[in-house]
Amino acid sequence: MSGRVSPTEQIHAEIDALFTSGRDLAEVLEDVARLGARLLMQHALGPQAALSKSTGSRVCQAIVGE
């Protein structure tokens, strides 16, 4: 059994961690919005783009401005 985490599960974990980070709520919501946009792009681009670090990540980062 692999310990690999799907990109979707990773983003969900990052969102959960933001709400327990103790940071200012406005900053947390901004980061959640950015991660949400990345999650939407992963779904829109399909599984092959989400699995391809060289393509999917760059496209998502360019769109959400990271």
Image (cartoon, rainbow, N blue to C red):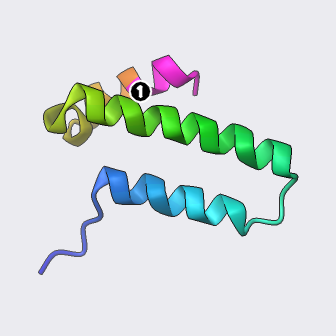
- Residue 66 vs 12, above or below: the answer is above
Circle 1 Cα neighbour tier, 10 Å, few/some/many (<14 / 14–19 / ≥20)? many
Vertical position of residue 2 compared to residue 4: above or below: below
Q: Please give the residue where the numbered disc 1 appears in the rendered image.
A: 60
Amino acid type, label 1: Cys
Tell me what residue is drawn at x 41 percent, y 58 percent.
10
| Percent of width and height locating residue 4 | 24, 67
- Of residues 47 and 3, the one drawn nearer to the viewer in this rendering: 47
Extreme residue toward the right, this view: 24
Relative to 26, 10 lies left or right:
left
Establish if 63 lies above or below 7: above
> In terms of image quadrants, where is residue 16?
bottom right
**Dot 1: what SS?**
helix
- The prevailing secondary structure element of the residues shown in magenta is helix
Q: Quadrant of the C terminus?
A: top right
Which residue is at 38% across, 25% downward?
58
Q: Is residue 12 left or right of residue 21?
A: left
Q: How many labels does the image show?
A: 1
Q: Position of residue 28 (x, y in %)?
A: 74, 49
Indicate the quadrant containing the N terminus: top left, top right, bottom left or bottom right.
bottom left
Question: Is residue 41 highlighted in magenta?
Answer: no
Of 46 and 49, nearer the camera is 46
| Residues rendered magenta in the picture | 60-66
Q: Nearer the viewer, residue 39 or 7?
A: 39
34 is higher (above) or lower (below) than 29 = above
Residue at 41 percent across and 27 percent down: it is 60
Percent from the top left, x then y, of residue 15? 57, 56
Q: Where is residue 54 in the image (x, y as percent from the top left)?
A: 27, 29
